[in-house]
């Protein structure tokens, strides 16, 4: 484990790479934490300085209340990233993290900055909505959703005490993402690379392609075998996509 950067509880830096010329900022899914991206940091360091965003209500921030609004999350993360833009930034967000990254990018661009590219993984386009109410279910219903998506460590789901500790943060995240609404005309100027699983129950291919409506910088779609957490099973393939973006040589 790494300690939080002093004074900034929002950012985790597992493998500081002071000589890297580019930074990757990773935004977790609902219920996820910065440590979900530890394998990405391990793989890309020291060529890329990888930062993981840590939302309140989990791990070392478990005593803080969760944030129930994507807009509020984006506001706080934008402030937390101040000073980290001395090198070109790339954003990678999975599921809820994709729309949080999109909103942070919008805020940074409005201030004259922003990422050079946004990787939107496992999430439909910001203006595509569904009638979802997982955040209104009881605890058993929330756990059932986690099991169905296979994105939560089975050890957490089997440990009743630990599970009850993390459920409030998960419920806050689901509240934020399920109540999130975005205008059709909201865009970023950076290019967007969309990653999706071909069997993701949360995102159809049409919903994934619609990210093209939310960028003036062009978009591309990459489809992988798998469901909502395809990136866990196709980790090498996803890392290869990131490596190509950062112009890193292919690993043998």
Image (cartoon, rainbow, N blue to C red):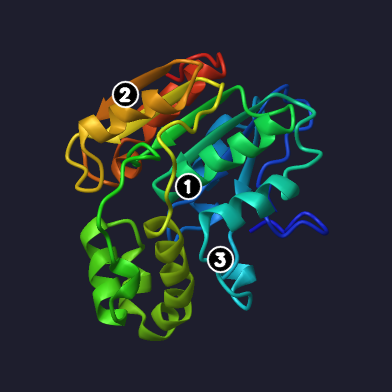
Give how far apart the Cα atoms at labels 3 and 1 are. 13 Å
Depicted 163 relative to depicted 184: above or below: below
Q: Earlier in the sequence, mark 2 or mark 1?
A: 1
- Quarter of the view holding residue 136: bottom left
Helix, strand or loop for disc 1: helix
- 27 left or right of 223 in image: right
Give the CA distance from mark 2 to mark 3: 31 Å
- Position of residue 61 relative to residue 29, above or below, is below
How far apart in space, not on screen, are marks 2 and 1 (Cα)? 18 Å
Rendering coords of residue 246 (x, y %):
57, 19
Question: Mark 2 against mark 3, which lies toward the viewer?
Answer: 3
Give percent across and percent down for residue 112.
74, 27
Secondary element under disc 2, as helix, strand or loop, is: strand
Q: Quadrant of the N terminus?
A: bottom right
Q: Residues within 10 Å of mark 2 (few under 14, many from 20)?
A: some
Mark 3 is surrounded, within 10 Å at the Cα level, by few (under 14), some (14 to 19) or many (20 or more) other residues, namely some
Q: According to the image, label 1 marks what residue?
A: 97
Upstream in sequence: badge 2 or badge 3: 3
Residue position for label 3: 67
Residue assigned mark 2: 222
């Amino acid at each position: 484990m790494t300690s939080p950067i002093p004074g900034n509880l929002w950012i985790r830096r597992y493998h500081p790479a002071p000589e890297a010329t580019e930074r990757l900022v990773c935004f977790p899914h609902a219920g996820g934490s910065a440590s979900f991206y530890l394998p990405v940091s391990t793989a890309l360091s020291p060529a890329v300085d990888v930062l993981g965003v840590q939302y309140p209500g989990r791990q070392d921030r478990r005593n803080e209340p969760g944030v129930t609004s994507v807009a509020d999350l984006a506001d706080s993360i934008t402030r937390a990233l101040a000073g980290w833009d001395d090198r070109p930034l790339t954003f990678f967000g999975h599921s809820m993290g994709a729309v949080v990254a999109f909103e942070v990018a919008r805020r940074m661009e409005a201030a004259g900055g922003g990422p050079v590219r946004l990787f939107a993984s496992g999430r439909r386009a910001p203006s595509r909505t569904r009638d979802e109410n997982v955040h209104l279910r009881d605890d058993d219903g929330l756990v059932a959703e986690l099991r169905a998506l296979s994105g939560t460590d089975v050890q957490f789901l089997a440990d009743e005490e630990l599970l009850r500790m993390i459920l409030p943060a998960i419920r806050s995240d689901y509240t934020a993402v399920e109540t999130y609404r975005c205008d059709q005309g909201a865009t970023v100027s950076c290019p967007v690379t969309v990653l999706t699983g071909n069997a993701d129950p949360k995102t159809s291919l049409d919903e994934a392609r619609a990210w093209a409506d939310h960028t003036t910088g062009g978009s591309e779609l990459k489809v992988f075998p798998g469901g909502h957490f395809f990136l866990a099973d196709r980790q090498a393939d996803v890392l290869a996509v990131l490596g190509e973006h950062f112009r890193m040589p292919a690993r043998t």
